[in-house]
Image: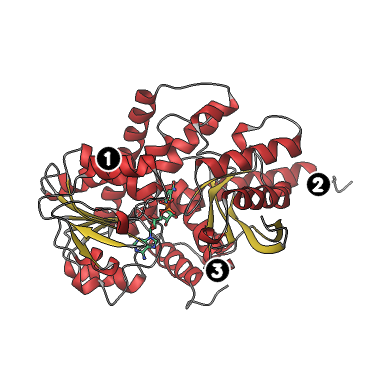
Amino acid sequence: MNDKNNAYGEVLEILDQTANLLGLEEQDYLRLKYPEREMKVSIPVEMDDGSMQVFEGYRVQHSSVLGPYKGGIRYHQSIDPDEMRTLAAWMTFKCAVVNVPFGGAKGGIKVDVTELSKNELERLTRAYTSLIYPIVGPETDIPAPDVNTNAETMAWFMDAYSCLRGEPTPAVVTGKPVELGGSLGRADATGRGISLMAREICKKHGLPFKGARVAVQGCGNVGRSAVRNLHRSGCKILALSDVSGGIYRDEGLDIEQILELFSENPEQLLKDYHSPGIRRIPREELLIQDVDILVPAALGHQIKGEVAPHIKAKVIVEGANAPTTIEGDKILAKKGVVVVPDILANSGGIIVSFFEWIQNLYSLKWEEYDINQKLETIMVEAFNKVWQKADQHCTSLRQGAYLIALDRLITATKMKDLNQQRMQVVSSPSPN
Ligand SMILES: NC(=O)c1ccc[n+]([C@@H]2O[C@H](COP(=O)([O-])OP(=O)(O)OC[C@H]3O[C@@H](n4cnc5c(N)ncnc54)[C@H](O)[C@@H]3O)[C@@H](O)[C@H]2O)c1
């Protein structure tokens, strides 16, 4: 786990660096180096042809210092324990930076979703739920959608969990369909947050936000909602990509038309989208388009050492989790490219997930306008705090965000430890 060559090694490196800046001893943050719990499950699923397949699944709970564990469930052929640990740790930092009372977790199944039918995916989700049932719940660990999972997946998860528990338990997951207790504004929250962060960073750098030229990598939950919100805020989306390739149009893509296609068929691929004036680009080239704002919103580790020198955007707003490697980040900093880091930029989803959870726990139904207002208040406040912290330490926004997150985590840990010591004093038998 301490191997600095794996992705979790990057977490440890950043943790050490940040602790150093805060003047912490290793003892102060040692527990954050280790996920609190890791569960690996083997998930048997009956396939449509009657055969049986067994899939590998995980749930990693990194830290519960600030509250119940919270984190998405990802379905992807490449996931492994190292990736799960890393993403779980990022969730701990993400909740801390925006001051949402959740800890960090992540789960996933090693599966190529394109090879399974919808019925098979449903059976897989229900079987996974029953296997991780002992460690999740509305008071303990609350999953949400992530790569290749969506509101429907959450509905299956919630139903399977409720059947096992013997009572309807909507608060066990967030990102559900609104009809099943999902929150208004949740589907769009991550993208709304990305657009807000793009607006704020442009303001700070004196770049015009309205009319800014944007490229977005990824057309899934996050990419689509980022595109929608940036477009509606007046930005010009020049380039867009997904796993099937990229498209570019100098005058700006017809975003309303593209979004319409996705609302008719969320599985739509850009290779099947045709419109006069668009130019096809290889998906790798999306990142190096001549734009003002780049939003990587697909997978992690896309902006590496090889591609970073060729990036032309002035500002990067990280929609995906960990889209920039440490090496890529260093190159961007030297080039003067400003990066709004993932743990701040894509926190809109977790914030509205928090609102969804509260509504479920207290059987409330908030108006979308109020949700969006609350989201904006929290994110803009978090942005300003990160900006100030980075400024104070003459460092990057990423480092500023980690400084705030780690400080909150350590303060909470110390308070808990103090109480634990007091309890031990109270409960220890008298020497007489
Ligand atoms: N879903 C959420 O609420 C949420 C919230 C915060 C962060 N995230 C993070 O955002 C990222 C995307 O999540 P999502 O939920 O949108 O996933 P998704 O599965 O809905 O979408 C992923 C998109 O990326 C595309 N893609 C895959 N490989 C690509 C490549 N090499 N080049 C270009 N495009 C590629 C896919 O075609 C798809 O359009 C992940 O890093 C995830 O952890 C998700």
Q: Which residue is mark 1?
A: 229
Depth check: 301 or 68 in front? 301
207 versus 5 height, above or below: above
Depth check: 241 or 211 in front? 241
Q: Which residue is mark 3?
A: 82
Do we see residue 384 in this rendering? Answer: no
Residue shown at the point (42%, 38%) measured from the top left: 187
Residue kind at label 3, given as amino acid type: Asp
Residue kind at label 2, given as amino acid type: Ser
Which of discs 3 and 1 lies nearer the camera? The answer is: 1
365 versus 158 height, above or below: above
Characterize the local packing of mark 2: few (<14), some (14-19) or many (20 or more) Cα atoms within 10 angstroms.
few
Quadrant in which the N terminus appears: bottom right
Which of discs 2 and 3 lies nearer the camera? The answer is: 3
Marks 2 and 3, the one that precedes in the sequence: 3
Marks 1 and 2, the one that precedes in the sequence: 1
Q: Which residue is mark 2?
A: 428
Characterize the local packing of mark 3: few (<14), some (14-19) or many (20 or more) Cα atoms within 10 angstroms.
some
Residue kind at label 1, given as amino acid type: Asn
